[in-house]
Amino acid sequence: DFVEYELPLKGEYKVFSNIPYFLTTKIIDKLTNAPNKPSEIWIVVEKDAAKRFMGVPTERKRSLLLKVNWDIKVIYHFRKDDFHPKPSIDSVLLHLSKKDNSDLDNIELVPFEKFIDHSLKYGLLSNKSLLTRKQVRIALKLESLPPLEKKQMPTYSQWICLFKCYQKFS
């Protein structure tokens, strides 16, 4: 049982696996939050789950937190005929590659998560936003990122930019 399996405490390693789909989140959480994380994860998952981890079509809390330390992409789209018996859902090979340099320092992860939680609850352009509309507009403009529209979910780059702006003013 991989969920009970102890991961290596030191040394570099990679993971390549076809997992039970109902454990996808648990397994990815275990691997990406391990004290000694694998350098790469190649994992066969359900297509819709892969899209959620990648933040497609819109970012989610989990995808935002993963992207801080991981590059995530679909490497291969399996055909249903590739399996026996044929599954009723689409499967893909998801590749997570640990970034050489994290987009945030470890001490910024908890504040970033709190920033995400607050912003998802109240919005980035609302009266309860942690940043003013002017701060949002200027921060994105200074980083040459597109402006936010009401009800639009920011991209990962926009989230990081706005969080760093928030840190400067808090």
Image (cartoon, rainbow, N blue to C red):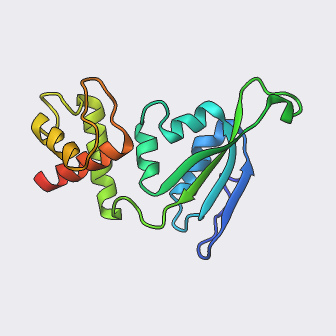
Q: Position of residue 108 (x, y in %)?
A: 29, 58
Q: Is 148 placed left or right of 129 in the picture? A: right
* Residue at the image point whose x is 25% and y is 27% from the top: 149
Q: Position of residue 27 (x, y in %)?
A: 62, 48
* Residue at the image point whose x is 31% and y is 44% from the top: 159
Q: Residue lying at the far bottom in this picture: please name it.
A: 11
Q: Position of residue 154 (x, y in %)?
A: 33, 36
* Residue at the image point whose x is 62% and y is 73% from the top: 12
For this rendering, which residue is in front, 68 or 143?
143
Asked if residue 53 is positioned above or below residue 166 in the image, the reply reads above
- Name the image quarter holding residue 122: top left
Q: Is residue 1 visible?
A: no
For this rendering, which residue is in front, 45 or 79?
79
- Name the image quarter holding residue 86: top right
Q: Is 108 placed left or right of 2 in the picture? A: left
Q: Position of residue 51 (x, y in %)?
A: 55, 35
Q: Residue lying at the far right in this picture: please name it.
A: 84
* Residue at the image point whose x is 50% and y is 55% from the top: 70
Q: Is 33 placed left or right of 120 in the picture? A: right
Q: Is residue 109 visible?
A: yes
Asked if residue 65 is positioned above or below residue 39 in the image, the reply reads above
